[in-house]
Amino acid sequence: MVVRVGVVDLLSLRPDSMTKRVFVEALRGATERLGWVVLESPFDGAAPGTGAVLGQHDSPGVRAEVDNVGHSEPIELRCFGIDPLGSADAVDWSAVASMDALIISGSEPTSTEIADEPCLAIIDRLLRECSGVTSLLFSCQSAHAALHLLHGVRRYRLADRCHGVFDHRVHLAPGALGLGETDAAAADFATGPEGELTAGLTTPVRVPHSRWNVMNSADLRDAGLTVLLDSEEAEWQLAIGSEGLRHVFMQGHPEYLPDTMAREYRRDLRRWIADSTLPFPRIPVGYFPAEVHERLIAHAESVRVHRDPALFDELVLPADPTEVARDWSAQARTFFANWLEAVRNRRAAASTHATGLASAEPA
């Protein structure tokens, strides 16, 4: 069975954008964990944005490898760049809606109130056009937009940016575990999407966050949503609505590569040098090892005093997960693998049901 997954990039129309790349890498890691076929991505051996796939099922070489692997599944991956400030009528919705599952990235906030964000028009249209897609996985601001449209949840502006890697507790069902309780019930996973999405994740689950706005865990629960990963420092990371897998929401960024947060920090320092009226960037929390963090405190002070771009040459960029204080990569692969497998299982069940109905019809 081919699982078709689309990445909707609301941050950049570039076919090789960093947003597309990090989600492609997250899906690549997940398929490798599952033992599914991964032969090419939109950035390997093909022009970006041309619809190259992971596990292209109509290629003879891929077909042979799928047959030899046994239970391996081929994955088709397409990337869509959509301008959140543009017209929803300009989007090829039939192509987007043809996917079995979609990951929808965040976009740059432009307003204090989520109700005033221009991206709401795109998210609202996506919810309507893609109502038949097995799972819509909303990330960051797109999650906030979808939560507001579907459940009326409010967004709040933070006094300081939430930027760092934070520990989260696994919740099994609404109210099953409070942040102050023990993990004694953690072995009794729910049989529904709660358990499917959190299988193999044990407290603490590390997830990067990078945002100036927040929707609170308490507000999500009051609106009837199930919070699956929660944090005392960063609020919720993973939640689902009453339709389970149909709408999945992430407030953080498990898809980040090891150096993504350092690159964001360097970008924000550059922005401050160009415009010192902006808030001076804080070093990401829980990200750099302690000795590097201490060194960067002195580096940040030099930037503040001298405003010299040459100082960026001294900024550390982690090359692999072992060079960050809290490595989230293995847990991120587990989550995305859970999501892909849940999508595959839903499609398989729907196919079996449809076959059963067809065989039951009178000749």
Image: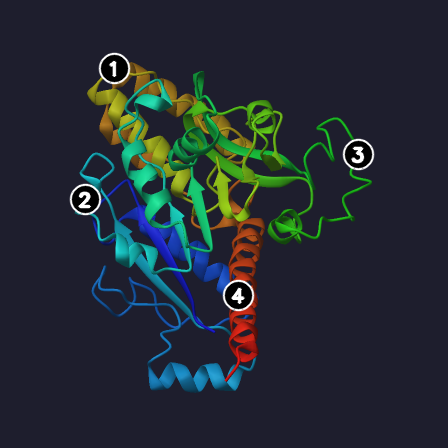
First in residue order: circle 1 vs circle 2: 2
Q: Position of residue 250 (x, y in %)?
A: 49, 39
In the image, residue 205 above or below residue 44: above
Which residue is the site of mark 1?
276
Mark 1: amino acid? Ser
- Callout 4: few (<14), some (14-19), or many (20+) C-alpha neighbours within 10 Å? few
Q: Residue drawn 51% across and 41% down?
A: 324
Which residue is the site of mark 4?
350
Cα–Cα span, label 1 and label 2: 39 Å
Q: Position of residue 232 (x, y in %)?
A: 62, 25
Cα–Cα span, label 4 and label 3: 38 Å
Q: Residue drawn 51% across and 76% down?
A: 358
Cα–Cα span, label 1 and label 3: 46 Å
Q: Residue drawn 39% across and 32% down?
A: 145
In the image, residue 189 above or below residue 223: below
Cα–Cα span, label 3 and label 2: 50 Å
Dots 1 and 3: beta carbons under 8 Å? Answer: no
Which residue is the site of mark 2?
89
Residue 24 visible in image: yes
Question: In terms of secondary structure, where does tag 3 sit?
Answer: loop
Residue 107: quadrant of the picture: top left
Give whichever of 352, 32 is nearer the camera. 352
Mark 4: amino acid? Ala
Which is more foreground, mark 1 or mark 4?
4
Cα–Cα span, label 2 and label 4: 31 Å
First in residue order: circle 1 vs circle 3: 3
- Callout 3: few (<14), some (14-19), or many (20+) C-alpha neighbours within 10 Å? few
Give whichever of 51, 148 is nearer the camera. 148
Residue 182 is labelled as 3
First in residue order: circle 1 vs circle 4: 1
